[in-house]
Amino acid sequence: MGIVVNLVLIVIASLLFFCVGFFIGRFMLEKIGTTKVLEAEERAVQIVQEAQKEANEYKDLKVAEVNQEWKKRRREFDADVTVKNNKFNQLQKQIRQKENNVKRQSQDLKESEKKVSEKLKGLEHDREMVASKNSDLERIIAEQNQKLEAIGNLQAEEAKQKLIENMVAVAREEATETIHKIHEEAEQEANKIAEKTLLTAIQRVSFEQATESALSVVHIQSDELKGRIIGREGRNIKAFENATGVDIIVDDTPEVVILSCFDPLRRELAKLTLQKLLIDGVIHPVAIEKAYEDAKKEIDDVIMSTGEETLSSLQIPDMPSELVSHIGKMKFHTVYGQNLLQHSREVAMLAGLMAAEIKLDAKQAKRAGLLHDIGLVLPESEEPHAIAGMKYLQKFRESKIVLNAIAAHHGDIEKESPIAALIEAANIISSSRPGGRGAVTPEGHVKRLENLEEIAKGFPGVIKTYALQAGREIRVIVEGENVNDSQADVLAHDIAHKIEEEADYPGQIKISIIREKRSVAFAK
């Protein structure tokens, strides 16, 4: 019984210990589990954070890679677009070129069609001419048959004579046509050679000044000298003008005194006189007279040196001193505002160059060109200056060719050599260019051109007129509907005749008539 009780107590105690241990163990397990859970949660949070950080870093890396790849693709795309744009522009350019080529080919085709049409018209005309000639030939054959029938009734000698007469007539006709053709070809070839010769000579001759001014300018060191030049109450100016015959102009132009006179020789003497006075520094009436006398002595040396320099520049040797002096005097003469020496040098150079081009004696041509106006510096004569110059040069035993060229350059006598024609042509070229003779001033030259245009405008049917090539050609535009080809020819002759009557001009003027007709249509 007691054992049973003990066993029961042991069992109860065991159960009690078991329960206590179970609850203690459960408590401990719960406590340990809570700690593990917290640690696990903290670890989980840490893992999540690390994962988030890695994810962000990975995302940034990928974004950077994507951006870099995008930029690379963008650059490749832009480069590809640029290449394609260039190709597109090239294609456009090629298309435009092809369009232009097509237009040009179309234009060429139209011109070709026009030429073909003209050729067809020409062929049609030729066909008509052939038909006409065939008709004429048939008529001639019929006539010849009749003549042969008549010849059949003639004696042998008469038939022979008739045949000879026919052959002579045919030969004369053919010879006349051949001579006419040769004459036309020779004239055309001569015109080409003349044009080439003139162009070559004109291109190789150039002068800076064509017209001579009536003023000379003297530079002084200071404006204080102007008072000394004027003198007390202007007595020095009066003495200077009385001695030289030249007007002296003292104005506000700084360091300049102007001399005015129509005579270049007197003006040059006055210039030398004033320069001497300025060098000496003494200016009064007595000094002016002395300086003027000294200048007259020096001017002869100036004239001789000018003549010698001219001969040297033109390479013309062997000329007497008297002629050299007259050549130097040309420097102080003008003709219609053109310096005579400069004009003579220009004529000499033009004539020499043209003579060389056509294988003539260039030295004779230059000599005649330089001396062609020598009569203008001789004492006044009732004869034309060309004849007076020829007679004066006869005593120096100039060649007949030179003498004839000088006397004939204005048509006073007949020309006996080609050099005479060259001198006449060179004289016209030199004197008729802008600023030369017939146009003393630029205003005068313009006025002459305007006058030529106005003369041509006065005719009915004329729309516009233009004076070209310094007045050497008048181009007239007329109404195409009111003026036909025949009327245009008549109009050109009428204008030329009126210009000959009313205008003063050197050389010749070409009248060109242009018929203008316009057709206008609108595409809507």
Image: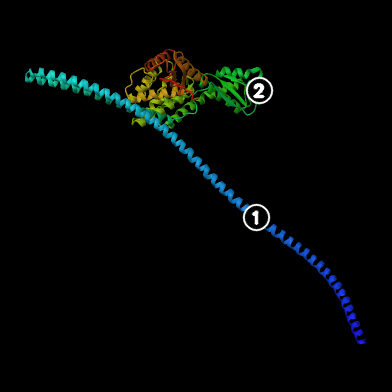
Q: Please rate how many residues cluster around mark 2, counting C-alpha atoms within 10 Å: few if below 14, some from 14 to 19, many from 20.
A: few
Left or right: where 287 falls relative to 378: right
Percent across and percent down for residue 73 are 60, 52
Scheme of image coloration: rainbow
The image position of residue 123, as x and y in percent, is 30, 26
Q: Which residue ends up furthest to the left in the rendered image?
A: 155
Query: Viewer-proximal residue, 412 or 164?
Result: 164
First-in-chain label (2 vs 1) = 1
Against 360, is 12 above or below?
A: below
Kind of element beneath mark 2: helix
**Residue 508, image x and y in percent?**
40, 20
Q: Nearer the viewer, residue 84 or 387?
A: 84
Q: Are marks 2 and 1 in contact (CB under 8 Å)?
A: no
Residue beneath disc 2? 227
398 or 177, nearer to the observer: 177
**Residue found at the far front of this picture:** 1
Q: Is residue 461 visible?
A: yes
Residue 484: percent from the left, percent from the top?
39, 17
Residue 462 relative to residue 160: left or right: right
What is the quadrant of the N terminus in the image? bottom right
Q: Which residue is mark 1?
A: 66
The residue lying at 66 percent from left, 17 percent from top is 233
- Disc 2/disc 1 C-alpha distance (Å): 96 Å
Label 2 vs label 1, nearer the camera: 1
Q: What residue appears at the point 16 percent right and 22 percent down from the top-left corner?
A: 167
Q: Total number of numbered labels?
A: 2
Q: Amino acid at mark 1?
A: Val
Number of the label disc, if any, that sits on residue 457: none
Q: Is residue 364 visible?
A: no
Amino acid type shown at disc 2: Gly
